[in-house]
Image (tube, grey):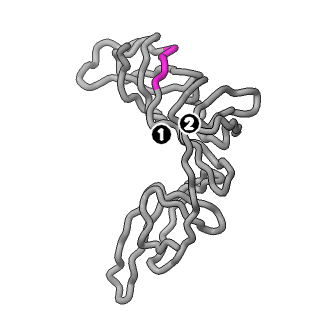
C-alpha cells in the first residue's frame, strides 16, 4: 500500500476503483496544529485518460497497480482502429483513436519507440515517444518587416496537424515535434 506522502511521479495506484498514474505531485504541510502533510496530485486515469487534480492527506493508503510497459510499434489504421504490435512477442492489438488520445494524430506507419501499458494482462493505453520527426506539407509565407522578435508561422505536418514553426521552416523540410504539447523542437537535417 502506498501512503499519500510516498507518492511520486510515475507511481500507479488504485484511486476510487480506477487505476491512476501520478503525473505531478507537490507536498505541503499546513501550519495548523495537528495538520498532516498534504499531497497535491495531478493524476491520469489509465482507463479513460481523464486528468484529475486531488489533494490527498498523509496517512491515507492506496493499493499499488502493477503497470507493465512494453515496447511496441504502430502498424496501420483501418476505418475504426489503430493497429499496434508488441516488439517482443509480435502480438498485435488494436485501439480506437479516442483510447490513444490526442497524440494519435502523430502516428505514422511503422513508427517504433511506442510504449504499450498493460494492467492485469490487458493493454489499457499507449504512450508515444516525446518527439517525432514529420515532414512539413504546408506552410504560411513569412511576413517581412517586423524582425524585432522571433516570428512564428502556421505549418501543417503529417496528417493535417497544425503547429507554429519559425519563419525559416519551409514546405518539404523535416522537423521534430513534441507530441505532448505540439510545439516545434528543431529542424532535422538529413
Estimate the spatial distance between the alpha carbons at disc 1 and disc 2, rounded to whole Å: 7 Å
Residue 148 shown in magenta: no
Which residue: 47% across, 20% down? 155
Label 1 vs 2, first from the N-terminus = 2
- Element class at badge 2: helix
| Residue denoted by label 1 | 180
Query: Which contiguous range is marked in magenta?
Result: 133-138
State which quadrant residue 119 falls in.
bottom right
Could you tell whether 7 is left or right of 148 in the image?
right
Q: Looking at the image, is 17 positioned above or below residue 71?
A: below
Residue at 61% x, 30% y is: 74
Q: Specify the label residue 63 is tagged with.
A: none
Q: Residues within 10 Å of mark 1 (few under 14, many from 20)?
A: few
**The image quarter in which residue 166 lies:** top left
Residue 103: image tag:
2
Quarter of the image with the C terminus is top left
Rendered view: 36 above or below 13: below
Q: Nearer the viewer, residue 2 or 88?
A: 88
Disc 1 secondary structure class: loop
Identify which residue, 74 or 45, lies in the foreground.
74
Position of 69 relative to 102 (above/below)? below
Percent x, y of residue 36 = 40, 81
| Residue beneath the point at 48% across and 70% down | 55
Contact? badges 1 and 2 (CB < 8 Å): yes
The image quarter containing residue 178 is: top left
Q: Main secondary structure of the magenta part?
A: strand
Amino acid at each position: 500500500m502506498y501512503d499519500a506522502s510516498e507518492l511520486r511521479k510515475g507511481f500507479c495506484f488504485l484511486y476510487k476503483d480506477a487505476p491512476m498514474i501520478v503525473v505531478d505531485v507537490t507536498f505541503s504541510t499546513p501550519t495548523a496544529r495537528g495538520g498532516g502533510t498534504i499531497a497535491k496530485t495531478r493524476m491520469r486515469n489509465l482507463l479513460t485518460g481523464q486528468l484529475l487534480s486531488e489533494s490527498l492527506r498523509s496517512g491515507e493508503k492506496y493499493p499499488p497497480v502493477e503497470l507493465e510497459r512494453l515496447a511496441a510499434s504502430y502498424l496501420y489504421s483501418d476505418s475504426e482502429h489503430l493497429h499496434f504490435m508488441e516488439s517482443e512477442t509480435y502480438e498485435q492489438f488494436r485501439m480506437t483513436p479516442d483510447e490513444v488520445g490526442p497524440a494519435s494524430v502523430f502516428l505514422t506507419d511503422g513508427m517504433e519507440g511506442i510504449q504499450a501499458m498493460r494492467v492485469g494482462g490487458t493493454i489499457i493505453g499507449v504512450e508515444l515517444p516525446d518527439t517525432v520527426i514529420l515532414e512539413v506539407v504546408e506552410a504560411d509565407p513569412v511576413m517581412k518587416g517586423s524582425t524585432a522578435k522571433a516570428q512564428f508561422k502556421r505549418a501543417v505536418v503529417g496528417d493535417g496537424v497544425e503547429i507554429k514553426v519559425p519563419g525559416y521552416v519551409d514546405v518539404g523540410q523535416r522537423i521534430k515535434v513534441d507530441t505532448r504539447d505540439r510545439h516545434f523542437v528543431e529542424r532535422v537535417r538529413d
